Image (cartoon, grey):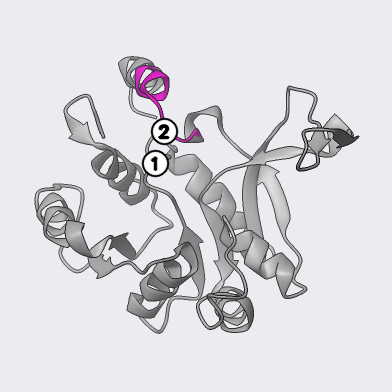
Amino acid sequence: MEVAGLPLLGHALGNVLACPEVAHVVVVAPPTELARARALVAGLAEAPSGIVAVASGGPTRAESVANGLAALPADVGIVLVHDAARALTPPTLFAAVVAAVRRGHGAVVPGLPVRDTIKQVDEHGRVVATPARASLRAVQTPQGFLRETLQHAHERGGAAHPGRLEMTDDAALVEEVGGTVVVVDGDPRAFKVTTAEDLDLAEWWLRRGRP
């Protein structure tokens, strides 16, 4: 997908690299898209040599993240996992997540309060519970971790056991192995671009100026 003539990955990288807290970036791309990802990275003026690498993804999210983690320099102690589909996430949100990890939290996710009433339903569509809305958050990325926390989660429940567990985010892996995850304030600009309407919204945000 493109917004304002640039692929979502290009916008995402621009915002990541604008955060002074980020020292290394690994772009994890499908094997069929590696050449395009490398070409995009090579054309980014914001990407200093050696700062951005490209790694091949795996068949599951957990395996893709594990590949990206393995490609990071050994001295990186805080890891952010981000979705390029959340391309307009502002640099300030990356910095806020890093700051929360540095305050002593092993796993941190940004999230926004839920506006709608949420119903939990069974396989027949029958409502089985109505969670209290005040306790719910719509979780975004980047999700931040101490490196050892994320590695432990993947070794116990992620890429090492792909048939046993496939979570939709890495914080869920941390929860699965008994870790604690803290939520910090998210940002409306960190929405996920998945539909034509989302592309229109992204265009609107860009017309307002860089996130």
Question: Which image quarter: residue 138?
Answer: top right
Viewer can see residue 83: yes
Which amino acid type corresponds to the residue marked 1 in the rendered image? Ala
Q: Looking at the image, is 163 positioned above or below residue 15?
A: below
Q: Which quadrant would the C terminus be assigned to in this image?
A: top left
At horizontal 48% and vertical 60% (from top left) the residue drawn is 80
Nearest the eye: 82 or 168: 168
Highlighted magenta segment, given as a residue range: 191-200
At horizontal 44% and vertical 38% (from top left) the residue drawn is 89
| For discs 2 and 1, the disc positioned in front in the rendered view | 2
Inspect the magenta stretch and tell me whether residue 168 lies in it.
Answer: no
- Cα separation, mark 2 vs mark 1, equals 7 Å
At horizontal 32% and vertical 19% (from top left) the residue drawn is 203
Give the structural element (helix, strand or loop) at label 1.
Answer: loop
Q: Are marks 2 and 1 in contact (CB under 8 Å)?
A: yes
> x, y percentage for residue 170?
58, 62
Q: Is residue 154 left or right of 88 when viewed as pictured?
A: right
Give the labeled residue for mark 1.
Answer: 85
> x, y percentage for residue 118?
78, 30
Inspect the magenta stretch and tell me whether residue 197 lies in it.
Answer: yes
Give the structural element (helix, strand or loop) at label 2.
Answer: loop
Give the labeled residue for mark 2.
Answer: 194
Q: Looking at the image, is 168 positioned above or below residue 12?
A: below
Question: Which image quarter: residue 24?
Answer: bottom left
> x, y percentage for residue 75?
42, 82
